[in-house]
Amino acid sequence: MKFVKPYWKQIFITVIIGMLKFGIPLLIPLILKYVIDDIIGAGDMTAAEQLNTLIWLMGIVLAVFLIIRPPVEYFRQYYAQWTGNKILYDIRDQLFSHLQKLSMKFYSSRKSGEIISRVINDVEQTKNFIITGMMNIWLDMFTIIAVIIIMLTMDPWLTLIAVALLPFYAVSIKYFYSRLRDLTRKRSQALAEVQSHLHERLQGMNVIRSFALEEHEQKEFHKQNGNFLNKALDHTRWNAKTFAVVNTLTDIAPVIVIGVAGALVIQDVLTLGTMVAFTAYMDRLYNPLRRLVNSSTTLIQAIASMDRVFELVDEKYDIQDKPGAGPYRHPRGEVIFDNVSFSYENDQEVLKELNFTVKSGETAAIVGMSGGGKSTIMSLIPRFYDVSSGRILVDGKDIREYQVRSLRDRIGMVLQDNIIFSDSVRFNILMGRPEASEEEVIAAAKAANAHDFIMELPDGYDTYIGEQGVKLSGGQKQRVAIARVFLKSPEILIFDEATSALDLESEHLIQQSLFRLAENRTTFIVAHRLSTITHADKILVIENGKLAEIGNHEELIKKQGAYYNLFQVQQLD
């Protein structure tokens, strides 16, 4: 209702226009009754008078249907769809804003395909709730009430017979729809799983082909698709039972009315025109009821989808600004880990009581065996995760005292696998600072040793580079990512295995860029090849989440401890 509230005027106008749309056809049975009883059955009128009256009546009726009805129909459809689409826009807009605030912990336990399914498919279903639940149901209720009132004015007893089956209709609706919501939710979840599976496989198509796994993956997709089919068929079976029972009730009622009305006409208790009009109104009474069955199905599906949408909306933020948190002003870049421990949810500790200081402008390299917690340390500095205990100080202040956005604005990251978006090279560099000028973009690219290869691309900086930068080599993607950080010009830099997957030539070019970028900035480097970090002011050796050694290259080599052993393993001089 929070999303609906801004558009209540449009919804109200749509319902009023809808009443006109549904109200005009309600005149037809009355016109039919008048033609049969008062024109054709009028004994005191000549044939010419009857024909003349009929022509005048048809002229007025046609004028109503040709002049009033079309604009009413147009505006009713337009406002209904306009309102539904605007509300969908607002929901998706807020959902995307919400998704950007959720922590990496949330994304580490969710499949991106399922999230996409909720934002696209399930939000689309909520449109049905708005159009059906907020508009159509009220119009159908209005039609039913209007028809019953008109029928009561013609014959109260026959009206009671006409509505006698309504209680059975209500009971059957309640019985069947209590389970339909659960079945619809399971069906939506199964569809989300198919979408998630498909999304992952499309991203990993090169792996599937390189291992010749097409047949295996076909079987895996068959399982996912089969699960959705089973859930869809369960839903369909129950839905079919609902329609079978409810539509039988709505079909029996007119038959009963025709039988009773026919007997009354034979006994001269009821006029033929009234019987014909009553039978026509039975159609107008039970058609909205049938629509309500369809609407109920639509609403159940929409509500099940809305459950999934608002379950996502209700996800709590793990990382958010504390009350009174301030901006990170006048940054120098000193970073202190003060007795920091960390674990992912209920898992065992990844980091244990880390204590170290990296002064402003220093370069600190973090080394150790895979799985030791090096990348986790890098994720804690920009608050992708919060520490389990202890604290991280930046410029003497706990990072939780800063506004998250202002802290991250002063941190630049170059990762092993940087995300490159399916847009132009210029767009990807501008993500460092969207308001930057063309000259600044080119300067950043030159500093990152990227300008030359960019100019060789078909459209230079305007070249579209495909999803995940598929048209660029690994080294070229890294240089675009580094150009992005140059443009951002942060005080704290994080290089997480930034050159580990590159050939020697690319690594050399990128090392040049990284050295240039790190000048006079506090820099953290996670490196696999120890030869690339011998220049670091501090080298931190992490073993099983603990700080095993700290010092510069010469100090640690002399110590002949963990770092020395790692260095010997790599057979470096």
Image (cartoon, helix red, strand yellow):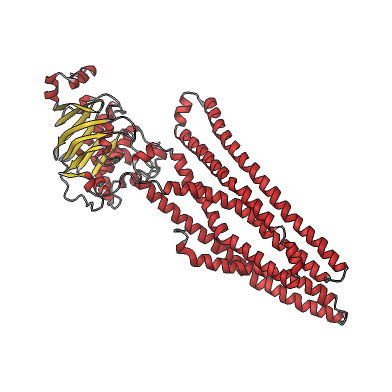
Residue in view at x 42 percent, y 49 percent: 313
Numbered disc total: 0
Residue 468: in sight, yes or no? yes
Q: Where is residue 471 drawn, in percent x and y?
A: 40, 36
Along the line of sight, the residue nearer the viewer: 541 or 525: 541
Q: Where is residue 330 drawn, in percent x and y?
A: 16, 50
In the figure, is residue 558 to the left or right of 532?
Answer: left
Residue in view at x 41 percent, y 48 percent: 314
Along the line of sight, the residue nearer the viewer: 249 or 557: 249
Residue 449: in sight, yes or no? no
Q: Is 527 above or below relative to 518?
A: above
Residue 137, by quadrant, is: bottom right
In the figure, is residue 542 to the left or right of 473?
Answer: left
Q: Is 357 above or below relative to 30?
A: above
Residue 22, by quadrant, is: bottom right
Q: Where is residue 536 drawn, in percent x and y?
A: 16, 31
Q: Is 36 above or below relative to 80?
A: below
Q: Where is residue 406 drawn, in percent x and y?
A: 24, 49
Residue 13, by quadrant, is: bottom right
Along the line of sight, the residue nearer the viewer: 56 or 516: 56
Q: Which of the image's four quarters has the C terminus?
A: top left
Residue in view at x 54 percent, y 33 percent: 224
In the figure, is residue 22 to the left or right of 543?
Answer: right
